[in-house]
Image (cartoon, helix red, strand yellow):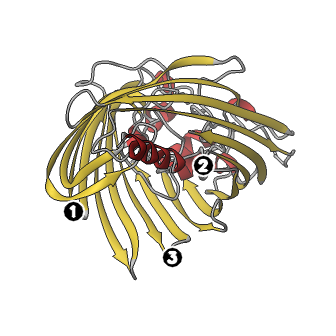
Amino acid sequence: MFRSSLLYLAACLTAAASCARADEAWNAHVQATYVWQAKPAFDAAYTGPSSLVPWRETGYSFSATAAFGIRPWAGAELYFDPEVVQGKAMSGLHGLGGMTNGEQQKTSGTSPTFYRARLFLRQTWNLGGDLQPVASDMNQLAGSVASRRVVLTAGNLAVSDLFDANSQAHDARSQFLNWALVAHGAWDFAADARGYTWGAALEYYGGDWAVRAGRFLLPQESNGLPLDRHIFRYFGDQAEVEHHHAWFGQPGTVRLLAFRDRARMGSFRDALAAAAPDVGAVRRKRSKTGLGLSLDQALTGRAAVFARASRNDGQSETYAFAEIERSLSAGATLQVRASDTLGAAFVRNGLSQAHRDYLAAGGVGAFIGDGRLDYHPEQIVETYYRIGLGPHAAVSLDWQHIANPAYNGARGPVNVAGVRLHGQY
């Protein structure tokens, strides 16, 4: 018996997986990601206070995360993720609707910053149906769940951990880098300046369908780091319906998301009516609403396509994500070899009429403001080639072409080349 146990343990280790017990009692994983990007000089008729500067620039980001998980009781999972980041954003993270590096935080600097990224509890109540295997991963204990179940997640986490989980364009550490491709561009989701928040979400899974809804804390002020704890006064709500299907024998998923933010935000029209256009001077309690539709579809075992469409009401300032109020994106990925992936995508971002008028009058937002505006939709093409370096590491080459940066036809186009190194175990 002892010899057979050793053989079983060796087989588990060889497969780089936890032993196939009913439930993994605990796990520990780590990841590290380094992104370096550069852009050459580009043409610009003028440059304003929040523009992408027209001369050559480089930028980088580094993140390292440890993820610890334990199972305190049956059906429960508790996770803790300490994280460190460091970086330098091109143009101080200004001058684009779709920023080029999804790993770049709004508060990162050239000195390492340590903090808690996640601390949350997940409770699953299985209601019946087929058992589905769950692999060991960051913030995921190996085990199995029923096809019919209710899941409560509460604590400190990223809203995108639960919502808008497009399989082909969701993770800047291994897929597309642009902000408008890692999530719905017009989804002003609740998050602090690092991308994390506190809150809770309840999910129901029933066969091919899933429904989830959650409420999370917004920052105390636009794109700030401290969160406002008055969750019944100021909050970010979202709800999503998800359907899994098979098309010509290949799996796919459609998701419909709706969100509502309630915070002290400045209105573009109110700012234009003031002596000088400044959304920061006209902030009061307001709501922002929006919708997003997402699709990911496998074509073969090696190829897949995806698309997103999102829109918010466009009446008030960006509060926690990107300066985008209408966004369409589509793309495809192809597994070239067993460990290599090629991805290509197109994005078209737009602004509401109120936001256009505000920028044209010289207004400045959290990320954009050229002093004037020759409005054109911002258009982005991104392609990456990810090369596997064994089972736990990869290097990616990335290129982005951005026409009408910050929606301004008087500036650009801009080309951004990048290299990403990622390791996870």
Q: Name the residue tied to disc 3.
A: 300
Rendered position, 398 above or below 323: below
Spatial CA distance of label 3 from label 2 is 20 Å
Assess disc 3: are there few (<14), some (14-19) or many (≥20) residues with their C-alpha within 10 Å of its C-alpha: few
96 vs 170, left or right, is right
Judged from this view, the residue extending furthest toward the bottom is 248
Three-letter code for the amino acid on which mark 3 is drawn: Thr
Location of the N terminus (image quadrant): top left
103 vs 405, left or right, is left
Location of the C terminus (image quadrant): top right
Whether residues under marks 1 and 2 lie with C-beta atoms below 8 angstroms apart, the answer is no
Judged from this view, the residue extending furthest toward the left is 127
Mark toward the start of the polypeptide (3 vs 2): 2
Spatial CA distance of label 3 from label 1 is 23 Å
Residue situated in front as seen by the camera: 25 or 320 = 25
Residue, x 86% and y 46% (percent of image)?
Answer: 40
Spatial CA distance of label 1 from label 2 is 29 Å
Mark toward the start of the polypeptide (3 vs 1): 1
Mark toward the start of the polypeptide (1 vs 2): 2
Task: Let me know if residue 63 appears in the view.
Answer: yes
**Dot 3: element:** loop
Residue, x 58% and y 59% (percent of image)?
Answer: 348
Three-letter code for the amino acid on which mark 2 is drawn: Ser
Residue, x 28% and y 19% (percent of image)?
Answer: 230
How far across and how far down the image is residue 174, in percent?
60, 49
How far across and how far down the image is residue 197, in percent?
40, 28
Q: Which mark is residue 207?
A: 1
Q: Which mark is residue 174?
A: 2
Rendered position, 425 above or below 376: above
How far across and how far down the image is residue 218, in percent?
38, 27
Assess disc 1: are there few (<14), some (14-19) or many (≥20) residues with their C-alpha within 10 Å of its C-alpha: some
